[in-house]
Image (spheres, rainbow, N blue to C red):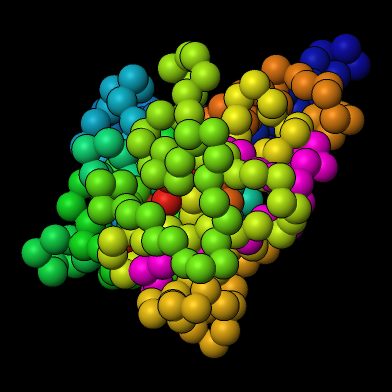
Amino acid sequence: MKIINNIALICFISLAFWGCKKYGDDYKAFLEDKEIKYPGKIQTAGYNTGNLRAQLFWHPSPDPSITKYVISWNNGVNKMEVAATTHDPKDTVKVIVPDLNEYVYAFVVVSYDSEGSKSIATEINNVRVYGATYSSTLLNRGINTVEPYQFLPDETLQLNFNKKDTMNVATTIRYTNSTGAIEERQLPAENNSIVIPNYKLGTTIQYRSSYIPELGSIDNFNVTQFADFPTIIKVTQLDKSLFRTYKLPTDINDEYGWKLENLWDNNNGTGGGDPAGFHTGGSGLPQWFTIDMGQTTKLDHFRLWQRDNALYDVANLKVFEVWGSNNPNTNGSFDNSWTKLETFTSVKPSGLPRGQLTDADRAFARAGEKFTFPAGIPQVKYLRFKVLETWGGANYIHLLELSFFKVN
């Protein structure tokens, strides 16, 4: 009995061995006696966005058998092949995928060898592509509204802008140069001003800013349209050597040797001492006086220097009118031959009562208080100051210097 059992056990083991061996080789029929190979997959993949395109990048596998990469998107509907030119993991492969829509994409990258074996897929997700919709949201860089431009001492023009937006990369300035040709210059994002050395006065300046939607973007996006820069007006000081007194019958007389012509002798008191200016007698207000500028021009503004030892006090001008004419009536009247250009009020920065001054008050007055004319005033040759009120309530007037500036 024992012998029979041993024989049965040996037969059973033999059948099992030959049966397992047979089935263990069955997979070869499906693989056609070929070994499965997986080429190396790409490493450290990423992207840079662009304008209706994207740049994919990765470090290649050191596997020397890789001959190409296949990139697919839109669930495999779209594909492109890229030849493998390096197998050095320190290198970076960069590929531009063109003709995309403004959308968020998922890309799949697979490595292939010469026998058609492919690697495990690598996904590059959330790749946002930008286009016209993004561009339509962009705004041009802000202009410095306090001082949008200035002419430098060498007569070049400087344009001033506000601090840049985070993603701003540049602003293109388009203008007409002195030869009449259109020229463009770039204002870098980190700069707040740009110098235009050969601008043709009286022509339009335009500007357009560009941005990137994300750091690393391969494309800049421009604001849809150029915008017009504020009109450039060159303002220069009038030549005081042309000024003359123009005494009309109703004009106030000077007193104490402080004559009208002292108002354009270029001595405004900032050099020290107590220089002579213009001083009238106490006949009551209003009082007026007339100046011949020696040229017919459109005025932009003027500066007035008070008598320095009585700042914001005594007979320094507080409220006054400025009138203009090209052919004053010789009888000295304010008839149709005169046009009121503006009524001005002197300002004390501190607002403190009479007799109290701050350093800022003194600095403001000694710089020459600026009074700006309205934009629409006519060109005039003669000016008439009509004083209505003084800072100290005096019934006479005094001041040191006047400087006038014209629009070129």
- Name the residue rendered at 57%, 84% in the picture: 335
* 357 in the magenta segment: no
> Residue lying furthest left in this view?
179
How many tags in the picture?
0
- Which residues lie in the magenta part? 376-400
Expressed as whole percent of the image width and height from the top left, the position of residue 29 reads: 47, 50
Where 359 sits versus 247, above or below?
Answer: above
Tell me, yes or no, if residue 176 can be seen here. Answer: yes
Relative to 208, does residue 268 appear above or below in the rendering?
A: above
Residue 198 in the figure: left or right of residue 33: left
In the depicted view, which residue is nearer to us: 217 or 174?
Answer: 174
Residue 132 shows in the view: no
Q: Is residue 167 left or right of residue 203?
A: right
Q: Would you say 265 lies left or right of 357 here? A: left
Q: Which residue is drawn at the image coordinates 50% and 78% (left, top)?
A: 331
Identified at 64% across, 21% down, the residue is 309
Side (left or right) of 358 relative to 300: right
Nearest the viewer among 192 and 350 is 350
User: Which quadrant of the structure image shows residue 80?
Assistant: bottom left
Q: Which quadrant holds the C terminus?
A: bottom left
Quadrant into which the N terminus falls: top right
- Whether 265 is drawn above or below 254: the answer is above
Q: 5 or 386: nearer the eye?
A: 386
User: Looking at the picture, how far across and down is residue 20, in whole percent?
Assistant: 64, 33
Query: Residue reaching furthest bottom?
Result: 336
Name the one closer to the observer, 181 or 305: 305
Q: Please state the horizontal and vertical placement of residue 146, each as a whole percent of the image.
A: 58, 47
Q: Residue at x 31, y 25 (%)?
A: 91
Q: Percent x, y for residue 363?
A: 61, 24
